Amino acid sequence: MHIDLLMNSSGTNELFYRDKNVVVIDVLRASTSIITALNNGAREVIPVASVENAVKVSSSLFGDVVLRCGEREGKIIPGFNLGNSPFEYSADTVTNKSIIFTSTNGSLAMVNAKFARKIVVAGFVNITTVVKYLKELNEDFVIVCAGKEHHFCIEDTVCGGMIIDILEKNEMDTTRTDAAQAAHILYKSFKRSLFKMVRESDHGRYLKSIGFEKDLKACATVDSIPVLPMIDKGVVKLKREE
C-alpha cells in the first residue's frame, strides 16, 4: 500500500486523480459538517466549487427538499439556508434533505477529485472508520488536505498523519512519499494535544475570532461520528455496511 499526501489541493487538475483512491480532509470545517449532516439524516450532500454553481444546482431540484449551505470567509453566504458550522446540521434541519454545499476550501478539493476511483471524506470525527475502510481496500491512496486558500494548514495535515499512524499500528505494509512521512511525524508531535493544536492553528484562531470557538472542540473530537461518507458521481452519501 503506497500512501501519498497533498498538503493542499492546489497545483493538481482533475486528471491527476483519475483511477486513484482519494481521502479528502477539511477538518475546519467542511468534512466535519458534511459528516454531521449525513449522520443526522441528510439524503445527500452535493459539493460544488462556487456560489454560482450552488444556486444553479439547487434551482434544478425540488425546492422544499433542498438546502443551500456553505461559507465564504467562515461566514454563511447571504441567501443560503445554513453556513459551515456542524451545529447547524441538526436532524430537525437536515433529515431527508439534499444539501448543496460550497466552502472556501473543502468543497473545491472534493470537486477536483471527481475522476478518482474511490473518494472518502475524512476528519478526526470519523478517522477510525476511514482507516478500517482503507485497510479493507488495501490499495494505494492519496490523502488530499484541503488546506487554507491554497496554502498549508496544520490541522488537515495532522489528521492525514493520524490516518497513517493508525494504519501502521494495524501492521499494514506501507510505503510513503516524503509528504506523507512528514505528516506522520507532525501527527506524532501533536497526538496528545489535538484540540490545542486545532485551537491554536491559523484557521482555528480565525474561527474563534468570528464566534465559532464551539466548533473547534467538535471538529477535534476523535471518532465521535463513526460513519463513512463516500463521493460517487459528485454526490456524497454514507457507505452502508454490506
Image: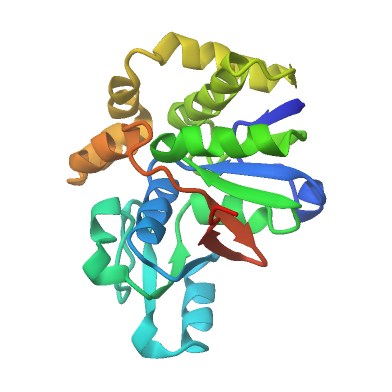
On screen, residue 182 above or below 242: above
Quarter of the image with the C terminus is: bottom right
Kindly identify the residue that appears in the image at 61 percent across and 39 percent down: 133
Residue 95 vs residue 177: left or right?
left
Residue 37 sits in which quadrant? bottom left
On screen, residue 210 above or below 94: above
Could you say where residue 141 lies in the image, as x and y percent from the top left? Answer: 72, 36
Residue closest to the eye, 232 or 16: 232
Residue 228 vs residue 73: left or right?
right
Instruction: Using the rendered image of the protein, determine whether residue 123 is visible from the camera's viewpoint.
Output: yes
Residue closest to the eye, 72 or 89: 89
Could you say where residue 194 lies in the image, as x and y percent from the top left? Answer: 34, 22
Kindly identify the residue that appears in the image at 42 percent across and 55 percent down: 34
Could you say where residue 219 lies in the image, as x and y percent from the top left? Answer: 33, 38
Residue 209 sits in which quadrant? top left
Kindly identify the residue that appears in the image at 78 percent across and 45 percent down: 20
Quarter of the image with the N terminus is: top right
Residue 66 vs residue 235: left or right?
left
Instruction: Using the rendered image of the protein, determine whether residue 27 is visible from the camera's viewpoint.
Output: no
On screen, residue 113 above or below 54: above
